[in-house]
């Protein structure tokens, strides 16, 4: 069983990222003719230098389930900073593409960061295939599995 605090933190991060990312993009994505332009703009946002904008773009692409963004998000999952890799794993899990799901599962197994591995597994469990991972409470030196307390 997963610690309630860890779950709350994961959803809190998701909620914090969702608000700014979807503020102006949500309407564009809902309109079919503008969707392609909005997705293209978000994919371009992944290549910037502003980490907050990169994370917002990645989150919005996941919410939009933009299969066009799978390859750039996979690159972000492998080469980005830890917070960027976490958001990339969430976005890829939400997209629903086989390549994206495989990349998230590989991150859950092989990423250098325990936080990224744990959250990638959690996102895979929630959005791709339930029952793949079993979560248990792991406490060491007063910290939970994510190194938080």
Image (tube, rainbow, N blue to C red):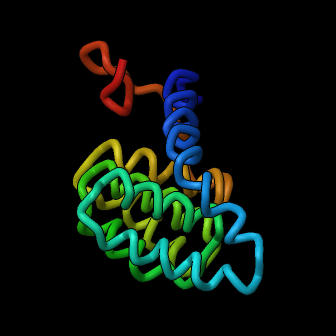
Q: Position of residue 84 (x, y in %)?
A: 34, 55
Q: Quadrant of the C terminus?
A: top left
Coordinates of residue 124 in the picture (x, y in percent): 56, 57
Q: Is residue 32 above or below residue 24?
A: below
Left or right of residue 84: residue 93: right
- Nearest the viewer among 37 and 148 is 37
| Horizontal side, residue 116 vs residue 16: left or right | left
Q: Is residue 28 above or below residue 14?
A: below
Q: Splitting the image into 4 quarters, where does residue 34 fall?
A: bottom right
In this rendering, is residue 122 above or below 55? above
Residue occupying image coordinates x 57% and y 47% = 18
Residue in the picture at 76% in, 82% down? 32
Question: Between 41 and 135, which is closer to the camera in this rendering?
Answer: 41
Residue closest to the eye, 32 or 130: 32
Locate residue 106, reporting x and y percent.
39, 67
Residue 118 is drawn in which quadrant?
top left
């Amino acid at each position: 069983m997963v610690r309630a605090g860890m779950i709350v933190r994961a959803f809190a991060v998701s909620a914090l990222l969702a608000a700014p990312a979807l503020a102006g993009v949500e309407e564009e994505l809902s309109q079919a003719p503008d969707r392609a332009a909005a997705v293209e703009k978000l994919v371009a946002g992944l290549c910037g230098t502003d980490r907050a904008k990169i994370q917002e773009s990645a989150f919005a692409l996941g919410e939009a389930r933009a299969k066009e963004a799978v390859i750039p998000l996979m690159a972000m999952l492998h080469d980005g900073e830890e917070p960027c890799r976490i958001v990339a794993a969430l976005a890829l899990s939400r997209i629903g593409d086989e390549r994206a799901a495989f990349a998230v599962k590989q991150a859950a197994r092989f990423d250098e960061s325990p936080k990224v591995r744990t959250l990638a597994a959690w996102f895979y469990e929630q959005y791709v295939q339930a029952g793949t991972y079993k979560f248990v409470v792991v406490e060491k030196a007063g910290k939970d599995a994510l190194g938080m307390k």
